[in-house]
Amino acid sequence: MNKQTLDFEKPIVELEQKLGELLRQSEERKIDLRSEIESMQRKIEATRERVYGSLTAWQRVQISRHIARPFFLDYVRMACTDFVELKGDRLFGDDASMPGGLATIGGIRCVVIGQQKGRDMKENLLRNFGSPHPEGYRKALRLMRMAEKFGFPFVAFIDTPGAYPGIGAEERHIAEAIAVNIRDMMALRTPIVSIVIGEGGSGGALGIGVADRVLMLENAYYSVISPEGCAAILWKHRKHAPEAAEALKLCAPDLVKMGLVDGVIPEPAGGAHCDPEQAADNIRATIEKELQILSKTPIEKLLTSRYEKFRRMGVFEE
């Protein structure tokens, strides 16, 4: 897997390289360098805490896009059991950028769906860079209705820069597909949990994002537009993406404060890509806890609470 180093991580990487050199010298030359090695390890930990304890919005966006960050199917493999993929929207075809099916999470049988990216060009072409077509959202809706019919909770994993904006998607009514999902998720008579695991871009995210519990991983982002898109509109250049990221308030702490998401799932130090298994354990435990609470709530109360939660969002004047 590609070990991508972000700009702000370079001080940590340089120290890790020095530590590796100390370990190599200690082994090859049979020199006792324990004190130097321990000192370097303490310095690495202190630097890591300093760097990751004060991340900017733009740095979190960079982590959310890290090539080694776990994707939806990685979490299915690590956090779920008995996964059975179900394909096709029964109208046009199957969308590989939006896989889904049946799975068991913490002993609870669920219907799961998520947006899937690729790690190389071949996989990205197959997955359309994580940007779903209309048939992806219609497949999601088909699986939602199946979950409702059989009394299964519905769990969505959001990770998309946005829905596919191409001519074919427009011809097959991408906006209508997303709008129908938003409408029908509001009235779906089963518990819904949505988790932003990476990028949560615009309507592409909202198409599977209306839920009783909307959660985010610590270094994910959720926004009406990408920082680069916002910078291109407001500053006429993508180089202003860091300023746009700050202005958009797209990170978990700001979104929780504004009531747009219901909770934050912690990531391992350095991001989910540094310890995917731990990140998956955190997600599994959170989903299990939320579904146990939601399953005990009468469905009419659940629907009322879901509707009121989204009606409270935003600030307006009459």
Image: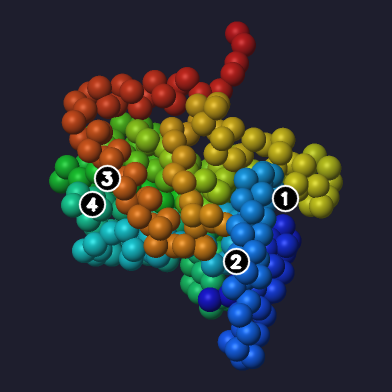
- The amino acid type found where label 4 is placed reads Gly
Q: Which mark is residue 41?
A: none
**Residue bearing mark 4:** 106
Q: Secondary structure at mark 3?
A: helix
**Residue bearing mark 2:** 38
Looking at the image, do the residues carrying marks 3 and 2 touch, with CB atoms under 8 Å apart?
no
Label located before the other in sequence (1 or 3): 1
Foreground tag (1 vs 3): 3
What residue appears at the point 72 percent right and 35 percent down from the top-left corner? 247
What residue appears at the point 27 percent right and 45 percent down from the top-left corner? 288
Label located before the other in sequence (4 or 3): 4
Between marks 2 and 4, how big is the CA–CA gap? 39 Å
Colouring scheme, one of rainbow, by chain, secondary structure, one colour: rainbow
- The amino acid type found where label 3 is placed reads Glu
Residue 96 placement, left or right of 39: left
**Residue bearing mark 1:** 228
Label located before the other in sequence (3 or 2): 2
**Residue bearing mark 3:** 288
What residue appears at the point 38 percent right and 50 percent down from the top-left corner? 282
Q: Which class describes the residues within 10 Å of circle 1: few (<14), some (14-19), or many (20+)? A: some
